[in-house]
Amino acid sequence: MRGAAKVLLAASGLVGLAACGGDDPSHWPAERPRIDSVTYAGQSPSDALGLRFTVTFVDEDGDLGQGNLQLYLGEASAGSIGLPQLFAAQTPPLDAGATEGEFEVLVRLSEAPASGEKITVAFELEDAAGNRSNKPSLTLATLAPGGT
């Protein structure tokens, strides 16, 4: 698989959005941002190691645009990006004071996963006041060339 020109990935499940009672949107603390969904949007057309995700959020107090997005691969932190930069890069750009919205983020793997390997990607938002969101995850499984 490492010699293949393109890594094929397929979403195998969305985990963690409603795993515990604390993630119930009707009982979510108003000061904390919330991720309502994470969707795998496919590989980057220009980079086989680039994975595109769409994140839908709610932030009732509107200070998320000054916070950060934390990325996890498996259970390990894999880096963060400032949301001012990410919001500005959207088409059209997201308002820094947005109380809800959707953004696309590109996650680039450092190397091609082996055939049959599973990769779990999780996202967590932190607003300007340091309040953290839920941490939904998505598990992707590599497919061998030909889709098997």
Image: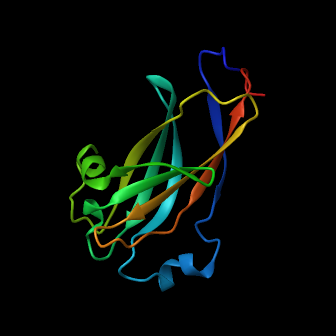
Count of number-bearing discs: 0
* Residue 92 seen by the camera: no
Q: Is residue 93 left or right of residue 71?
A: left
Q: Is residue 8 above or below residue 123?
A: above
Residue 5 can be seen in this image? yes
Image quarter hosting the N terminus: top right
Residue 87 x/y as whole percent: 27, 51
Q: Residue at x 58, y 27 (%)?
A: 111
Residue at 38% x, 73% y: name it: 131
Residue 100, percent from left and from top? 33, 66
Q: Quadrant of the C terminus?
A: top right
> Picture coordinates of residue 15 (x, y %)?
64, 60
Does residue 136 lie above or below 99 as drawn? Answer: above
The residue shown at (63%, 76%) is 20
Left or right: 124 in relation to 4: left
Q: What colour scheme does the image use?
A: rainbow
Image quadrant assignment for residue 55? bottom left
56, 69: nearer the viewer: 69
- Residue 97: x and y, percent? 21, 65
Residue at x 66%, y 14% (from the top left corner): 3
